[in-house]
Amino acid sequence: MSLILFAFVVRVRDGLPLSASTDFEHSKELQERKHQLRTISKTLARFPDKGTVKGQQLNIHFVSSEGVSYMTVCHCSLPIAKAFCFLEDLRWEFTACSNSAAIALADRPYLFLEFDGTIQKLKQQYNKSGGPALEVTLIEVQNELLIHPPQVIQLEEVELANGIENGHVDQSSGSVQNIRLEPVTAAGILSLVLNIMCASLNIIRGVHLIEYSFQDDYEGIWNVVAFFGAFVCCVCQCHLYLFHSALKKHKASALWTAVVLCNLYLVGLRNPLQLMFHVSVASLSAFLTFTRKLQDRSSDCGV
């Protein structure tokens, strides 16, 4: 099984392809990763010099140096140190056979076509041996990754960058509201209804508990806070599912955690079935938020 499936050398300034490996595999996920790789190559200024995009079976890794970015699609079983060792070897080979002036003046794609053969040889070396021949090089890369680890880029960042690059997203203020998500599914509607139900139960219990807490010198006031906190989280989960938001997955995880903590605090006031119901609804909402993607705009082009 090939561990390194595709390699790509591009100019950072404008994403101009300089050289690439030859395709021998055509799986669906590989085509998706290559599409994301080319999207990143066109917007490298938005990303760090060293980054990783994790997928289900295939990962993207890239390193940018001296105006050139070296990118690869690898199988997830390939250790990250070996992937970046491959990119370092690729960078060294390309730097040795090219000059900065020729790179800067390149005016058409794949001007360094002769370098494709070098990429193929390097790929074969790694795919046959599982890594570089020199262990010293691997150790150096491992130490460098410990000091300066690559930034993990979320897939939604890649999709958003793709929308901006193709003119689908307005970059002016308020552009987030203009981003379209995939249509709401039946499961999404169920999640919204259940979230509204949970929010209603939380606010009703919280309001009823307020008068008792005030009568007893604010004893149990934190129970009221937990009910109102769970209410706010339910409302926020509905909003997060319906509308696009930056760092969506992080926010969904934080809201799910908050709902769980609030319900754990209310163990004495809710029976196990009620607690399971509230946590299950929060889990369903978080899962659907995680899996709802940006809408594919290709159908809107009118071609």
Image (spheres, rainbow, N blue to C red):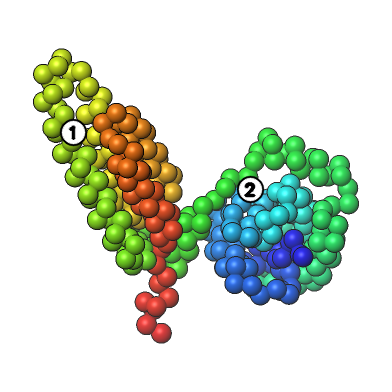
Looking at the image, which residue is at 32% across and 31% down?
267
Three-letter residue code for mark 2: Lys
Question: Which of the 4 image quarters holds residue 24?
Answer: bottom right
* Left or right: 165 as drawn, with respect to 111: left
The quarter of the displayed image where residue 189 is located = bottom left
Residue at left offset 74%, top offset 61%: 4
Residue 128 point in image, percent of width and height: 85, 61
For mark 2, what is the residue? 50
When the figure is inspected, residue 185 is found, relative to residue 231, above or below; the finding is below
Q: Position of residue 31 (x, y in %)?
A: 60, 71
- 193 on left or right of 26: left
Q: Quadrant of residue 118?
A: bottom right
Q: Is residue 255 above or below residue 52?
A: above
Q: Nearer the viewer, residue 163 or 240?
A: 240
Q: Is residue 44 left or right of residue 108?
A: left
For label 2, count other residues whose C-alpha is less than 10 Å away and answer few (under 14), some (14-19) or many (20+). many
Q: Position of residue 248 (x, y in %)?
A: 40, 50
Circle 2 SS class = strand
Residue furthest bottom as drawn? 303
Which kind of residue does numbered mark 1 sit on?
A: Gly
Horizontal and vertical percent position of residue 177: 30, 57
Residue, disc 1: 206
Q: Is residue 88 visible?
A: no
